[in-house]
Structures are given as C-alpha cells and as structure tokens.
Image (tube, rainbow, N blue to C red):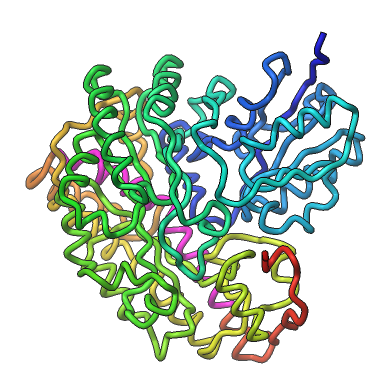
C-alpha cells in the first residue's frame, strides 16, 4: 500500500504596500482578496490522489498552529512581493521540524535566498513533481529539482484543484491558456522564466477547467493569467471559437479579463472574437510614450502604431484597457512626467499601474546593470512593497531626485479625482459593449456600498463620481457596470496614490538633504542573476 502524506499548502502574504491589493474593492464585493492562488492548486493536482491536501491563503484567512501540527509536509512559494512572508513560513517550518518545499517564480529567480527550505522546485512543476514525489517516498528530506526554462509541455498540466479554493473569498478566479511571450522586453523576466515561444494548452484542457468552475457553482469574473494571451494568435483563434460555443451553451456565466500586447488592436477579427466571448478588460504594458525608451527596452511593438488609436479601437470593441507605465529608464533625457500624463489622458485609461523601474533577477536589464557596475548590492534581499515603492534598485542615469519627482508628479496628476473620473467618463462613452452585463449575486449590494463609501476616497470624489454616472447613463447605459467597476477601484487607488506620493516625497527630501547615499553596487556576478 502506498504511504499517504498530509500536505499543507500555504500561499504567502503579499506585501501590504501594493498597487494590486484592492482591499476596499474587495470589501465592497464581500471578497477578501482579488485573485485566487492558481499555482498552488495546480501543483496540488500533480500530487498523488491518496495524499491529503489542505490550502491556507494567508491573504484571506488565518494560519494556526493546528494547521502545522496536522501536516507531514508544507508547500509554499510565490512571487517577489511575497518573499518576506515566504521566508518567514520557511523559518517557522524549520523551527517546528516540518519539511518545507518552496517553488514559484521568486525562488526560481533567486534560489540562494531560499536555501533554508528542505526542497526547492525551480521552474515549471509539471515535469519534475514526479521526481520529487519519488524522492520523498524513498525517505529523502532535502533536494533541488529544476525544470529546463520554457520547455515544459503544458498539455500535460493537470486540471487545477479548484475544489480547494473558497471561491467566495476572491474577486476573480484565474485559469491559464498559454505560457511564454514572443517579445523580449529588457526589464521583463517572463521570457527568462517561461521562454519566447508561447506554449498553449489544448482547447479541451481549458474547457475542462471552465466546466469544473461552473460545476462548483462559480459565476462571474475569470481572469486568463497568461502574460500575453495573443502570443500565439493562431491557437487562440481556434480556442475562442470553442469558448464562444461553450459560453452560448451555458448562457454566458463568465466574463473574462487577461493581459495582451498592444498589437491586439491591429487584428480586427481577433478583437471581435474576444468581445464575442465576453472578454471585458485587458492589461497592456505601454511603459512609456517615449520612442527612444521603447526602443532601448526592446519594446518596439509599441512604436509601430498610434497608442491613442490602438486603445480607442480596443475600447470601441467593448473591452476596456488597464495599463502599465514605468519611470526611470536610461533613455529619459529630461522630464518625462508631462508626456506620460498626456498619454494617459489622451488614451482615456482610468487604471494605470505607474511604477519605478526595478531590475528583476534574471532579466536582460539586470545583466546590463551588473556589467555596467550600477546594480545596488543587497537590493535582492528584502521587499517592502512593489515597484510603486521599492523601485530604482540601481544607479539612475538621470539625477535620482528628478526621476522620483517625475514619478510623484504623474501619480498626483492621474489620480486626482477630476482627472480619474474624467477618463472614466470618456471610457464610458467609448466602450462598445454588445452584451448586457450578467448580474450576479452581490452586484447590487456592492453598488449600494459604493454609493455610501465613494466619499472616503478623498475630497471631491463623490461629486465627480455622480457626474460620470449620469453621463454614462445618458450616453451609453450598457457601459454602466464597467464604469462602476473602475469607480470601485478608486476607493483603493485614490488613497494608495496619496500614500505612495508621501513616501516618494520623503525619499526626495532625503536626497535633497543629503540623508540618502548611493548604496554599494554589486561587484561580483551571482550565478542565479546571470544564467548561462
């Protein structure tokens, strides 16, 4: 008889100072966190069926002593903003004598930081978990298991254990169609972790995942977590035809979001197919309106088209855009603040993740900064926030004060309530939704809560909100559910932007008054930073 095992899966806390927490929006909807831990429930499906698995998400529920006492093994890990808590979990496990396994993107990028774990699973888990399980069953309690980067056959990826999730705790649940991205942006670690050749699951695999969520009673927002959903357009188009048929058969129980590159706007058929299958939002990495910066960062796909026209095309198709912008590139010859503000206003994108450039482990940017002797030593050790508050871990070409001042200028401008709700109003007029939003349990309750709480986001916010709502009701009522969504996010984004601005102001003051000194730079290349 095969020996069974009790596995406690712990999803670490994200750092509190994060753009992505959306705490107030979660509270409106009666949720506890935006996204469910797809990686861990996928790994759970790779374990032997007779093993018992318990999942605790530290972002949504308490982890108690009894959980540790129950377990024969602990599995944890995640992304860089979860590093502090992941290391704490590992330390706790070692103190309790519980074998701990760590995996995920951050340990894969910086394995030496996680050396205290009993086991490290580096890279994609599908093809190496069998080796780990075999070693565990033989009695080994230490080991490193590494998958070749970007080579895993995702058609072997199992149906995630969605049954382990408390689905009502999340704003949305994730599924995955593809891994990898065909572009080679200098600052991005996706191509280093998952490769430049997008690998796709079979249509049947993804349909089975949707069937599983549907059977569990889940309805509403499903996020395709792909780093670039349109990386393999041919495979995606074939998938979307099946997805549309499935949605029709089930009376459209799900609305989808994802991440894609701006060239989506060039393909009218693909854009129409996404809208027809009920995609309502995409995240696009715009990064900078400056052509020189885009060329330097190897994001040339953003230079080959009008950003304003491209975003307008996507909005008119009925899909609204959230975008990422970055301040701190070497190519910035002077102040970039006004150009970025103008770009955000011209494209009418309400939700913009504006961050400071951060050199992630394994990226081309980190390798270049190492070669130039500009990467700060020790910057990889701890994480206190995300790229909003923990960026610029290198010596900037422009004076650091100027970069920080540009950043705070952009945040102050775009998250002023007049500017933010002005963009929401223009989005509401443009958004060409063909389908009526499917009301799900809690939608009306969330809206009522929003009405009573919108004033909390700052002076003048409530008036701007109601002017925008009236404008949308008069000109494009089908867009109302989506302008309400973006308004709910302002409950987080307004106060968060002011918090970040206050932190950046303190940093600027430290620079001006001589309290900030350039940290030591890395003089010796570390193996995990520069893979062969």
The residue positioned 40% from the left and 54% from the top of the image is 457
Q: Position of residue 498 (x, y in %)?
A: 47, 65
Q: Position of residue 231 (x, y in %)?
A: 37, 51
The answer to whether residue 274 is left or right of residue 2 is left
Q: Is residue 365 magenta?
A: no
The residue positioned 69% from the left and 44% from the top of the image is 103
The residue positioned 19% from the left and 35% from the top of the image is 276
Quarter of the view holding residue 427: bottom left
Q: Position of residue 40 (x, y in %)?
A: 62, 34
Q: In terms of depth relative to the viewer, which is nearer, 371 or 330? A: 371
Q: In terms of depth relative to the viewer, which is nearer, 210 or 466? A: 210
The quarter in which the N terminus is drawn is: top right
The answer to whether residue 119 is left or right of residue 124 is right
Tell me if residue 100 comes above or below residue 51 in the rendering.
below
The residue positioned 30% from the left and 29% from the top of the image is 444
Q: Position of residue 65 (x, y in %)?
A: 82, 29
Tell me if residue 409 comes above or below residue 110 in the rendering.
below
Tell me if residue 4 comes above or below residue 483 in the rendering.
above
> Can residue 503 be seen in this snapshot?
no
Q: Residue furthest top?
A: 1
The answer to whether residue 6 is left or right of residue 362 is right
The quarter in which the C terminus is drawn is: bottom right
Q: Is residue 481 magenta?
A: yes
Q: In terms of depth relative to the viewer, which is nearer, 163 or 514? A: 163
Name the main secondary structure of what is drawn in magenta.
helix
Q: Which residues are magenta?
A: 478-506
> Can residue 376 be seen in this snapshot?
yes
């Amino acid at each position: 008889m095969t020996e069974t095992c009790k596995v406690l899966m712990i999803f670490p806390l994200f750092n509190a100072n994060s753009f992505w927490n959306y705490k107030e929006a979660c509270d409106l909807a009666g949720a506890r966190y935006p996204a469910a831990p797809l990686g861990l429930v996928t790994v759970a499906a790779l374990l032997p069926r007779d093993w018992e698995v318990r999942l605790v998400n530290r972002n949504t529920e308490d982890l108690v002593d009894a959980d540790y006492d129950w377990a024969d093994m602990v599995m944890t890990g995640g992304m860089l903003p979860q590093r502090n808590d992941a290391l704490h979990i590992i330390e706790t496990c070692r103190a309790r004598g519980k074998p701990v396994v760590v995996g995920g993107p951050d340990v894969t990028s910086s394995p030496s930081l996680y050396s205290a774990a009993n086991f490290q699973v580096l890279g994609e888990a599908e093809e190496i978990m069998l080796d780990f399980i075999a070693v565990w069953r033989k009695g080994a309690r230490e080991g490193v298991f590494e998958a070749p980067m970007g080579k895993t056959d995702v058609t072997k990826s199992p149906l995630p254990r969605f049954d382990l999730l408390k689905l009502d705790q999340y704003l949305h649940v994730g599924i995955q169609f593809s891994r990898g991205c065909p572009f080679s942006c200098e600052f991005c670690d996706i191509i280093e972790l998952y490769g430049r050749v997008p690998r796709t699951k079979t249509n049947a695999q993804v349909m089975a995942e949707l069937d599983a969520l549907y059977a569990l009673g889940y309805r509403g927002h499903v996020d395709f977590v792909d780093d670039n959903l349109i990386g393999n357009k041919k495979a995606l188009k074939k998938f979307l035809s099946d997805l549309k048929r499935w949605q029709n058969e089930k009376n459209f129980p799900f609305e989808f979001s994802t991440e894609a590159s701006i060239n989506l706007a060039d393909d009218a058929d693909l854009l129409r197919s996404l809208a027809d299958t009920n995609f309502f939002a995409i995240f696009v990495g715009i990064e900078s309106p400056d052509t020189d910066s885009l060329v330097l960062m190897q994001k040339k796909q953003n230079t080959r088209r009008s950003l304003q026209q491209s975003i307008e095309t996507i909005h008119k198709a009925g899909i609204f855009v959230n975008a990422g912008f970055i301040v701190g590139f070497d190519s910035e010859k002077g102040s970039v603040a006004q150009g970025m503000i103008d770009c955000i206003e011209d494209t009418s994108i309400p939700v913009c993740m504006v961050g400071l450039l951060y050199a992630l482990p394994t990226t081309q940017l980190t390798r270049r900064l190492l070669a130039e002797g500009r990467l700060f030593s020790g910057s990889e050790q701890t994480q206190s926030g995300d790229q909003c508050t923990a960026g610029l871990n290198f010596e900037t070409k422009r004076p650091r004060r100027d970069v920080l001042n540009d950043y705070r200028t952009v945040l102050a401008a775009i998250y002023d309530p007049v500017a933010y709700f002005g963009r929401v109003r223009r989005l509401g007029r443009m958004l060409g939704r063909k389908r009526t939003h499917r009301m799900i349990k809690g939608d009306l309750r969330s809206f009522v809560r929003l009405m009573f709480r919108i004033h909390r986001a700052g002076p003048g916010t409530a008036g701007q909100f109601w002017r925008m709502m009236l404008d949308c009701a008069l000109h494009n009522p089908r867009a109302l559910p989506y302008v309400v969504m973006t308004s709910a996010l302002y409950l987080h984004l307004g106060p968060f932007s002011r918090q970040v601005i206050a932190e950046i102001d303190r940093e600027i003051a430290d620079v001006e008054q001589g309290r900030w000194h350039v940290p030591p730079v890395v003089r010796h290349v570390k193996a995990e930073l520069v893979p062969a």
